[in-house]
Image (cartoon, helix red, strand yellow):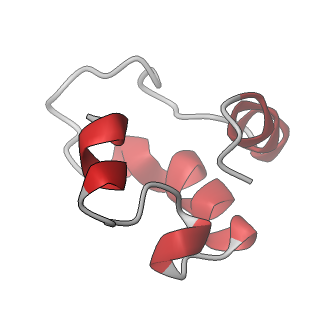
Amino acid sequence: MRDALLVIGAPTTARSLGVTDEEVVQALVHAHEINKERYTILGDEGLTLEAAERLAKITKVI
């Protein structure tokens, strides 16, 4: 998917979309609140701030 987006010149990172590092981290911290009836890999209680920052760095989002 990423390669296809790059071919057409579409953004492929949060930064290229204009999303700040802090917004990425906050989105990860609060993502579990969006649909409480749906299970996600983020778990029922979501991520801690530290875990969200680590995840964003590992996946090279920030």
29 sits left or right of 10 in the view: right
**Residue furthest left as drawn:** 37
Residue 21 located left or right of residue 27? right
Q: Position of residue 10 (x, y in %)?
A: 31, 65
| Nearer to me, 40 or 36 | 40
**24, above or below 17, in the image:** above
* Relative depth, front residue between 1 and 62: 1
User: Image quadrant for the N terminus?
Assistant: top left
Residue 45 at x, y percent in the picture = 51, 31
Number of numbered discs: 0
- x%, y% of residue 19? 55, 76
Pick the residue in front: 50 or 19. 19
In the image, farthest residue toward the bottom: 18
Q: Residue furthest front?
A: 7
Left or right? Give the position of 49 relative to 45: right
Q: Residue at x 54, y 82 (%)?
A: 18
Rendered residue at 40%/65% (across/down): 11
Above or below 52: residue 15:
below
The image quarter containing residue 2 is: top left
Quadrant assignment, res 60: top right
Q: Position of residue 35 (x, y in %)?
A: 19, 45
| Rendered residue at 53%/72% (across/down) | 16
Horizontally, residue 61 falls left or right of residue 62, namely: left
Quadrant location, the C terminus: bottom right
What residue sits 43% from the left and 55% below the top? 12
